[in-house]
Image (cartoon, rainbow, N blue to C red):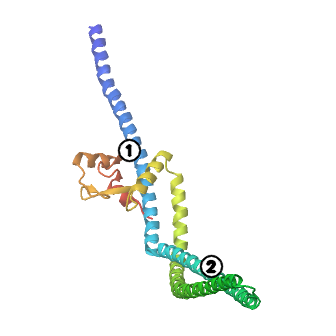
Amino acid sequence: MAKSKATSRSKNTTKTEEPEIVTTTSAMDKTAEDSIESVVKKKLTGLYTLQLIDTHIDKIRIVRGELPLEVQDLEDEIEGLETRINKFNQEVSDLEMEITQKQNAIKESQELVKKYESQQMNVRNNREYDSLNKEIEYQTLEIQLSEKKIKEFTAAIESKKQLVEIAVNELDERKNDLDIKKNELKDIIEETQKEEEQLRQKSKKQEEIIDDRLLGAYKRIRANARNGLAVVPVERDACGGCFNKIPPQRQLDIRLNKKIIVCEYCGRILVDTSIVESISL
């Protein structure tokens, strides 16, 4: 009888202990899941915060518009015009030297003609006279050729000078345009520089708390994205970057924050709206 009671007591003890073991195991599993969710959510929150900061910086740069590129294009055009003007001026200088040489050649030929004409007065026979006459004719042709070249060079100089004048006027216009664009850009930079610098420092600090592997992926995705968005929320059951529909099961996985999920269409990192709403800059 005593043995039966002992056995019964033993069975009761076993029954009361089993639920305690099960309860303890379930609590451990839940704690592990909560821990994973907390870590992933923290990573996603950090990434999305960085995205918001960088997007703000992008918007400031968009305000500047195409001005920096326009300034660079004008500077390149001005440099090209200055090079062209210098080239034309050098060509004019070379042509003027050619004219001087031809003028000197004409003087030499004229002196030779005078010399040969003087010698003709003292010739002893017709052969000497004819020989000197040919020399005179040759020098006369040289004078005519040099005069023709001088006319050609003079015309070329006038043409080059006209091109220089046109290029100089165009250069003045471009320099004026450049001054206007630079002043516009300066005003915009002064308005936004302080805010941009603060955001850049904020972005740098945010990067320091993000895992290197995730940060590398973020920068790679952002560089390849046309709008600079690497981390986007799910909006109206679709990716906030490419706007393709996301399956319900995948949306559930995103809401659970148990792992980092990317859009299967564009490769952007997806975050739940709860993370979006929890961030304020």
* Residue under the point 47% across and 49% down: 216
Where does label 2 land, which residue?
90
102 horizontally vs 1: left or right: right
Query: Which circle's residue, 2 or 1, is located before the other in the chain?
Result: 1
Looking at the picture, which amino acid does disc 1 mark? Glu
Does residue 42 appear left or right of residue 179 in this picture? Answer: left
Q: Nearer the viewer, mark 2 or mark 1?
A: 2
Identify the residue at image location x=43%, y=69%: 59
In the picture shown, does residue 88 fall above or below 216? below
- Vertically, is 86 above or below 10? below
Where 172 falls versus 49 (above or below)?
Answer: below
Q: CA distance from mark 2 to mark 1?
A: 75 Å
Name of the residue lying farthest toward the right? 122
Provide residue 129's location: percent of width, then percent of height.
69, 85
Give the residue drawn at x 31%, y 48%. 254
Q: Position of residue 143 (x, y in %)?
A: 63, 86
